[in-house]
Amino acid sequence: MTALPRDTRDTLYNGEVEHAVIGAPLIEPAVIAAIAKVVRPEDFYLESCGWAFEAELQLYRDGKAIDTLTLEAELAQRDHWAGTGSVFLSDCISATPTALHAVSHGEVVADFSKRRRALDLSGALAKAALSSNGTFPAELALTAATLTKMSEGLKPSDKSRRVVHCDIEMLEPLKPLDEIVRGVLAAEQVNVWSGDGGIGKTYCAIDLCAAVAYGKTRWVDFDIVNGGPALIVDEQSGHRRLVRRVKNVLVGHGIEPQGRIAWLTFPHYKLVSQPKDADALRETIRAANARVVIFDSLLNVVESTGTGNPENDSVSMGDLFSVLRQVACECECTIILLHHVNRGGGYRGSTAIKDESDGLVILSRAGDSDVVRFKSEKLRDFEPFGFSAKLNFGSGTFNLSPMSVDDDKGERLSKTMIYCLDFWAGHGDSKIKDMAGPDSPFKEATIRSAVNDLVNMGRAVRRDSGGTGVIGTYGLPTQMTVTL
């Protein structure tokens, strides 16, 4: 990129304001989420401030405290402490008498960044225009269009399908892939997890959310690279069931809730036909600062363009994925759509689901196993993978754990057994006829057989004294634990 002379470009920044943006989260950590909506690390002119803001964002995404000690440690881990130091942090705090104006200061930093970018582009445009002969080159028109967009006051966080780019941008450093879970998920992706009903897709998704949102270093067998809060868009479970499931997962991981997993129940988004719904989704994701967004399920969010099943309609699917990808890119998050499989075990519906997704993963269970298998069918940004994880249900707890060879030789839990354990975790001690109520997917005889097997395995106990004419009451043993 050809830039204007440094003495011109270097006037377009305010060092005191940049220091104040870094100091604000050190005074009031909660303000970092609002600042992140208006400014990015690369917007800072002072390299030390860009490093510090990136480190503050990482601390926030990891659910860690933001203070001088944690920031110092994060900068040192990134080999940036020598370029900042304690004097730098003191200057930042001194430049910040209050955090009330943090967002306004962030907007100033972003505005100066946009002006420097405009100067660089205009310099390149002027040089190319003076050196061209005859017809005005097409790339100059594209650069001029970019400058026009910038002059209209487009904020750095706003993106549009209609922004014109040109090959001059190739001279700038390419933004690296923003991985969330290494080799599995990255920002700006729309993924599909497809599995049979009752296989545990929702629990697996919530387990992922907990690991990413609460600063875990790994999820199952994969490193968490750049985590942060999570958002669940629920069109299936309802608030009561989802609360129970989220609680079970947090307890299963020994996590104290801190508001880093958010959800909406039955929002009934029409993301394609109602642009305001897509805007509302963006606002919700940004408010939650979500890195992972779960939709449960794909069928509930796709809109029909005809009379048939919308999941078989390639136009409907294409329109939906187009909107969701734009949302994922603008909000710098990954989106996972939970979906079902067909009778053959493959994803159900139009081939557009595979064509349009950035990642398609099939979840399966081998017979009555309590082991779930993840196998990629399509990945745009990663190498193919396949792994297994163990479904650990306990008394009001759930988590996924890596699958070892020994685990595969252990006891098996059928879907009915898992249903019973989940029912007791949510309802407490119960009679079999109550467990086989209208909401049960299993018949009473099937549940009775599963309960007897669980008692024999030591995973359930009978609470009453038994005897002729006594209707049995069953529940989880109080000493049951889950291997974390």
Image (tube, grey):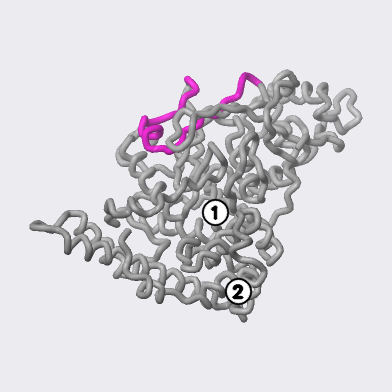
User: In this view of the protein, which residue sits in the foreground, 111 or 319?
Assistant: 111
In the image: residue 77, left or right of residue 43: right
Which residue is pictured at 47% across the width and 65% down the height? 39
Secondary structure type for disc 2: helix
Amino acid type, callout 2: Cys
Which of the two residues, 53 or 249, is positioned nearer the viewer here? 53
Kind of residue at disc 1: Ala
Tell me the quadrant of the picture where the N terminus can be found.
Answer: bottom left
The residue beneath circle 2 is 92
Left or right, residue 423 beside residue 293: right
Q: Which quarter shows the C terminus?
A: top right
For the record, the magenta segment spans 344-368
Residue 363 on the magenta segment:
yes
Q: Earlier in the sequence, mark 2 or mark 1?
A: 2
Q: Which residue is drawn at 64% across and 39% down?
A: 219
Residue found at x 65% / y 49% = 243
Q: Nearer the viewer, residue 154 or 26?
A: 26
Q: Which mark is residue 290?
A: 1
Q: Can residue 105 be seen in this view?
A: yes
In the rendered structure, find residue 458 and report the number of the disc placed on it.
Answer: none
Q: Quadrant of residue 218?
A: top right
